[in-house]
Image (cartoon, grey):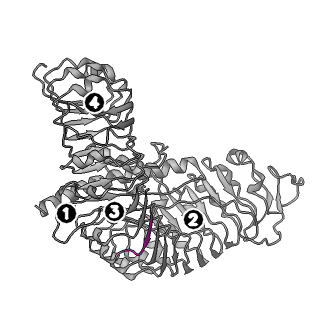
Amino acid sequence: MTSLVNLDLGGNHFDTSTLRSICNISSLTSLDMSYNELQGSIPSEIGQFPQLTVLKLSKNRLNDTTPSSLWQLTKLQGLYIGANALTGELSEHHFAKLRELKRLDISDNLFSLHVSSSWVPPFQLQYIWMGSVKIGPRFPNWLRTQKEIVELNMYNASISDAIPGWFGVLSNDTGGIILSGNKLEGSLNSFISVADDDKKFVQMWYLLLNHNHFTGSIPEDLCKLRTLIYLDLSNNHLSGRIPLCLGNLRYLSFLHLGSNSLYGQIPGSLGNLGELISLQLSKNRFDGKLPPSMQNLKRLQSLDLGENRIADTIPAWIGERLSDLEFLTLQSNNFHGGISNTLCQLPYLQVLNLAHNDLSGSIPHCFKNFTAMESTKPGTFQFSKSSYIDPLLRNFKAGIELEYLKNIDSVKSISLSGNNLVGEIPDEIMGLVGLQNLNLSKNHLNGRIPKNIGNLKQLETLDLSMNELRGEIPPSLSSIYPLSSLNLSYNKLSGPIPSGNQLQTLNDPSIYEGNIGLCGKPLLNSCPAGESPTENGPVLDDKGHSESDFSWFYAGFGPGFSVGVVAVVGILQFKQSWRYALFKCVENAYDRIWVMIGLKTSRLRRNFH
């Protein structure tokens, strides 16, 4: 063992005692114990590797401050201790002897970095992963000395400052910048300024500046970053129109501009982005109609245009040409007309959100063709794990509390609330047994609740309120054990409220209010013994009563997405496990995003060298 040089024990179940037991192998130059069950402090014996050039301890449960011996490993070129619970203040003294350091991952710990504004590090870093390290409030001036940066990740770094002009000349080899989740301000023009013959940012693959305070317009110089694969400027204060030239970024796969103040029509040039997988433009002020050129986005899996001012019918080409769609979110616009049967040509659709528009007509019976909703298995918008790019992955959790359950991999939902839909609820929807959310509230639906609604065994939320439904509540409803949010108020329902099983836990009378023909618990009026249920009740104004509408979310990743994809990504307030599901879906989505980016950037490197 004295001649052992490389030791890879990553992805196992080793604990800290294993790490201590190998600290006497002084010949090691590379040690990987990432993705294990190390906990407690990093052993001080770690300093017994005088030849060590690479140390990987990421994704464990290490805590406490780092031992001084760690910072005496003078030959270190790669130090990876991200995604633990390490604490303490890191100063210039810690890095003083790491002259050969090239890759540094200290992300997602409880570190703070305190160095002077005049600090000149002894190293030239190529990969800087400092997400969730408290670096601010000032923009780190020491970055100015780093001339070899390939990837820079400082998300959630407590920086409240403008980006200085010198930042734009870090390195001609800079491939990725992630500054999400800070309070950066000012115009993007301050550092995205590229001359026609400039090599600056020529190999930029991803630029993520989301969740900041940037103002002004989207600079046209962005269009000169011709190798961009991922662009996220969402959740800022940007205004103006989308530059037409963004349609020239032929490698772009993820374009997220949501939650800004952008306006005008969505430019038809975006239809040139044939590689696009996720387009997220929600929460802006876009108006007019959807450009027909968008039907050329045949690889699109996530389309989020919610909360704008788009006035159009739902184009037939969405179903006819965008056959890979898994997430379609058009809520809170001015879409009108009927729900086209062509939407039923989207077999992979997992989330359909058309809520709060001006849609009319009936619910298509062909919704049964949403075969992805017939399954309880995860959808296809998921990715393989890559430990190399895992530190980048963690960016997409910036500003979001990730509380996910590992056994929930996807969200499958239909929301058509707040429209003018009429007719009966199609029995065919009851065959979508993977559905977790069904919201048909605030329409003019009539007839009875389908008797076989109990087939929806995965349903967690059901809202049929403010319609004109009549008849009895089907007893099968009580057999849906995951059901935790139910609203049947303000209809014409009658008869006894089913008891037993899950409905016993849903004992809020407001669930059933506005149905004067209903009786039994949790209502105060008891059912007369032997009396048959009555069916009629007054027609109530579905716009005039207090609402208990469930908050809804949008899907932009990738999965985020927020997953980011699935970034990603959205806000879920009505159910904790829905937040778990969305963010897990987002994390899975972004795993695949980075694998794809790795493949694409390798190809682009070959093309541009």
Q: Nearer the viewer, mark 2 or mark 1?
A: 1
What residue sits 31% from the left and 72% below the top? Answer: 220
The residue beneath circle 3 is 231
What residue sits 33% from the left and 28% below the top? Answer: 13
> Alpha-carbon distance for marks 3 and 4?
36 Å
As helix, strand or loop, the secondary structure at mark 3 comes to strand
| Amino acid type for the residue under numbered disc 3 | Leu
Mark 1 surroundings: few (<14), some (14-19) or many (≥20) residues within 10 A: some
The region drawn magenta spans 237-242
* Mark 1 vs 3, N-terminal side: 1
Q: Nearer the viewer, mark 2 or mark 4?
A: 4
Whether 239 is among the magenta residues is: yes
> Alpha-carbon distance for marks 1 and 4?
35 Å
Task: Indicate which disc residue 93 carries.
Answer: 4
The residue beneath circle 1 is 202
Q: Is residue 503 above or below residue 25?
A: below
